[in-house]
Structure formats: structure tokens, C-alpha cells
Image (cartoon, rainbow, N blue to C red):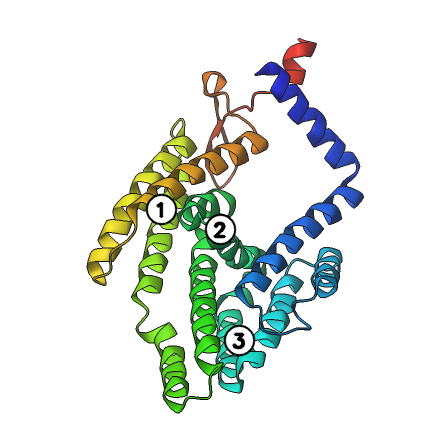
Amino acid sequence: MTAILSIKNKLRDFCRKQDEIVTPIFKFVWTLIVFISLQKMFHYSDLGSKTEVTILLAILTALLPDAFMFVMAGILIALHTFSVSLEVGAVFVVMYIVMFCVYIRFFPQFAYVMFLVPVFFMLGIPYAAPIAIAVLAGLGGMVPAVMGVVLYFFSESTAEISRLLATEDVENEIEAFKQLSDVIIHNKEMYVAAIIFAITIAVTAVLTKFTYDYALYIAIAAGTVVNILASIFAGYIVSNDVEMGAVVIGSIVGIIFAAIVRFGQGILDYQHTERVQFEDDDYYYYVKAVPKIDSEKKDKE
């Protein structure tokens, strides 16, 4: 463990010293993954499906502020949806503007969560997302996570609409427009996923805020249990069965992801917890300080 911590500390120090280079590279890799996932979900425009366009968008997004990803992703998806039909494109634009006005405008730092959800869906482990998002973004990630669920199921419906419109049958066109309305109103699978995500993120994020020892680890474990129970509960509410195998596997992957994130942030040493009390003219303060295990300090000692 000491050797692993030492390697982690060296990587951390290197990233801090080379922040001007490392940060854009990480942002480029992340945005490239997002745009590749979006192009797999929406693949109807020849221009938007070109590899050169994907790389160019990833480069631009990596060099600009984080909130710019929301704009570029919206332009890319709009290009694809308008290629399906004018109605599909218009519905997407309205839906995307509502998402922006309701949440992203006020909390742009959580915009990445909305695109993290489709990435997990495309990887085949969607139910790992709630636990991962709770650890990364906390309670603030709940709303954009639900938006990410809506975006993914909108892409599923868009694929079906594209298939129906590929023929010139009038009945298929009517069915396509019915499918477009059902994506928001009658999509039980989408509602189930949204409820599971919201409940799991809320419970996990709230429990991490408690000050008792091992609160984060307990929150991750509780989030895993809630993730499974919420799947049963949500399925019962909307009368739609949930594939429990996918939920269990996703929860396990979520635990692994959360453990990796926690290790990257630092392992807490609860055996050396310190409690400090002090006061000023207005308040009396109780401070609990939990040190992180640092192999370099131990080596120096």
C-alpha cells in the first residue's frame, strides 16, 4: 500500500507542476469520450458523424470553459436530429433549452454530469452512474443526472423514429410522430431510470455529509443497497420490470469507481482524528480534522 500511495503522490505532484499541460489533455480525452458516445447515440448526419468533426469539437471544448461543452454537444445533437426530421430537431431544441434554463444556467459546473450518464449507458453499465455521480458531484448532480437519462432515452426514440421514417408509408409516419410524443409522456423505462438515479444520488450524497467515521464508505454501501431497492420500488410504481442483473452489476461497478475516486482524493486516517474547539466574538467553533494517509510524510518521519 505504501508503494501505491507513493506512486499516487508522485503523479499528483507531477500533475500540479504541469497543470497547464495536463489539464487540457485530460479535458480533451474526456470530451472526446463524450462526443464519441453522443455520435453513437445520434448518427444521422454525415457531417456530424465525421471523425474530423469529433476531434475538432473535442479540441475546442478542451481549450474553452467547461460550460462550453453543453453548447457544443447541443449543436452536434441538433445537427443529427434535424437530419431525421424537422419535428424531431425542433423537439430536441426546445427540450435542450428547457434543460439549460432550468438548471445548467445556474449550475454550469455540473453540466458534465448530464453527459456522464449517456457514457455509462453506452458502456452497458448505466446503474453504476448514480453512485459514481454521488461521489463526484454530490447532491448537485441529481438534476443533471436525470437530464442525462432523458437525453439517452430521447436518442433511443430518435433511432426508432428514423427507422419508421425510412419508409414512405403514411402509417409509419404517424407511428413515428406518436413515438416522438411518447418519449416524454409514456416512456415507463425512462421514468424508472430517472427515479432510481434520483433516489440513489440523493441518499448517497446526503450520507457523505455526515461527520461520523467512515461516513463516505457507509454512504457508498448504503447507496448500493438503495440502488437495488429503488429499482424494485420504481418498477412497482410505474408497472415496469427492471433487469435486476444489470442493476446489481452496475452497482458493483459503481462501488469500484467510487473506491478509485476516493483513493485519488486521499485515504482518510480515522485513527488520528483531531477535534479542536475555539471561539470568536460571534461564534464558538467545533472542528473535526481527519488527516489523509500520506506515505511521503511517513517516509520523512
Amino acid marked by disc 1: Ala
Examine the rendered structure and indicate whether residue 255 appears above or below residue 87.
Answer: above
Q: Residue at x 62, y 74 (%)?
A: 45
The residue lying at 70 percent from left, 66 percent from top is 50
Disc sitting over residue 120 in the figure:
2
**Viewer-nearest of discs 2 and 3:** 2
Q: Residue at x 61, y 66 (%)?
A: 73
Q: Where does the image place residue 105, in percent across and percent down from the top left?
A: 56, 68
> Which residue is labeled 3 in the image?
97
Spot occupied by residue 28 in the image (x, y as percentages of width and height): 71, 52
Q: Earlier in the sequence, mark 2 or mark 3?
A: 3
Q: Are marks 1 and 2 in contact (CB under 8 Å)?
A: no
Which of 45 and 139 lies nearest the eye of the viewer?
45
Amino acid type at circle 2 is Phe
* Residue occupying image coordinates x 46% and y 16%: 271
Res. 296 image quadrant: top right
At mark 1, the secondary structure is helix
Counting other residues with Cα less than 10 Å from the Cα at mark 3, is it few (<14), some (14-19), or many (20 or more)? few
Instruction: Tell me, for residue 288, which label it has, or none.
Output: none
Image quarter (top left, top right, bottom left or bottom right) of the C terminus = top right
- Which residue is label 1 attached to? 246
- Earlier-in-chain disc, 1 versus 3: 3
